[in-house]
Amino acid sequence: MDFQLTEEHLAVREAARDFAQNELLPGVIDRDTNAIFPKDQVKKMGELGFMGMMVNPKYNGGGMDTLSYVIAMEELSKIDASASVAMSVNNSLVCWGLEKYGTEEQKEKYLKPLAGGEVLGAFCLSEPEAGSDATSQRTEAILDGDHYILNGTKNWITNGSSASFYLVIAQTHPELGHKGISVFIVEKNWEGFVVGKKEDKLGIRGSDTHSLMFTDVKVPVENRIGEEGFGFTFAMETLNGGRIGIAAQALGIAAGAYELALSYSKERKAFGKPISKHQAIQFKLADMATQIEAARLLVYKAAWLKDNGEDYAQASAIAKLYASQVAMDVTVEAIQVHGGYGYVKEYHVERLMRDAKITQIYEGTSEIQKIVISRSILR
Ligand code: CAA
């Protein structure tokens, strides 16, 4: 067991930290207030190699390990979780599955620009009536010669209007239940594909969340990933890795709020001394530091298991379940340390608290993580 980060990991952390401070911090309050997608920032993240970090360099990726990815996710999420979720979805929900299961033609055409950060991708599983109950897909893709006819609606899709390519999960054989679900690559400009309304959200307000409508969209057979019926397994396997990314995001939100609370506590005076000299605040800081350290170890362990070819489904669910709870607990306490200042936008911690909440919901709610964990334990 080695707790020492390599030179490469430290360099990734430094690069992500610099980028977050210099490029994400300016304007982050305005983007949150006005629900503006960080388009220019995400483009720069692509140029710096953050959008396909784990993809093989022959497909324009960074060829790095999962630990590098979670380190970068933590640093960016300390400042702007709206930018980091765009990165997480592109890396682990879109590029990963394309690289693992896509054909060489699909990788050339779609993975290369996605991993190189030229375009963004989206992962379309959730529907109005299929959120946690993901097997209940209503979207249908019916084979018609050399293409499928796709009809249906997807909800709460991250990168919904900014993406160019969409991985869409759909029923190809409804009578087979989840074994009749398949997955397709759909391009944004195809006829019949309409980007619906943008969601007005509590947190990650800069993230571009939309519903999507497909009406008789013609999808060529060669755009199916894997065999017919492989779509549900594809989605579950993809989410096993995605949850490591969201756990790292939750960790970053918590760590960002903690760092702000720590520095504020040394500056703010009450009763004749900095509030960090009061035990009430010291104990809060101690609890936050302990929870964050525990979350970080769980996230790193899940990443390590994935990098070493071990089963990581249970570890990623544990990491997400715990880190997202830590994100909620720590951001609430960080506001408390800031007192009245914590309740206003200028001090950032109220935004971090609003951003934290989604980490208990997307890529599987905390309750779903408990299902995954308990099934794995009891198997
Ligand atoms: N890894 C691999 N395979 C899995 C799996 C996992 N974690 N979980 C289930 N499976 C497989 C099962 O082995 C089974 O396969 P077989 O039939 O071949 O044996 C199949 O999937 C069906 O599994 P279940 O019988 O367990 O299905 P279920 O309906 O009882 O429960 C569930 C499945 C775990 C609850 C699943 O529906 C689930 O994970 N739901 C949550 C969905 C989710 O995370 N949505 C997030 C949306 S994406 C998002 O948020 C993206 C974004 O933009 C940020």
Image (cartoon, helix red, strand yellow):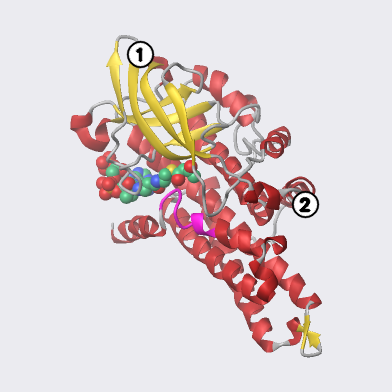
Residue 189 is left or right of residue 56, and the answer is left
Percent coordinates x, y for residue 208 in the rendering: 56, 40
Residue in the picture at 77% in, 90% down: 271
Residue type of the residue flagged with mark 1: His
Residue 1 visible? The answer is: no
Instruction: Tell me what residue is drawn at x 69 percent, y 53 percent.
Output: 29
- Among all residues in the image, which is located at the extreme top? 145
State which image quarter holds ligand 1. Answer: top left
Q: Quadrant of residue 285?
A: bottom right
Question: Mark 2: which amino acid?
Answer: Gln
Residue 147, numbered circle: 1
How far across and how far down the image is residue 84, in percent?
62, 46
The residue positioned 81% from the left and 76% from the top of the image is 267
Q: Which mark, by number, is residue 21?
A: 2
Position of residue 338 relative to residue 368, above or below, is: below
Q: Quadrant of residue 114?
A: top right
Task: Tell me if 199 is positioned left or right of 338 in this view.
Answer: left
Compared to residue 376, the image places residue 309 above or below, namely above
Picture coordinates of residue 367 (x, y %)?
36, 59
For the point 55% across and 46% down, which residue is it? 307
Segment tinted magenta in the rendering: 356-364
Q: Nearer the viewer, residue 22 or 239?
A: 22
Task: Please determine whether, in this image, residue 22 is positioned above or below residue 59.
Answer: below
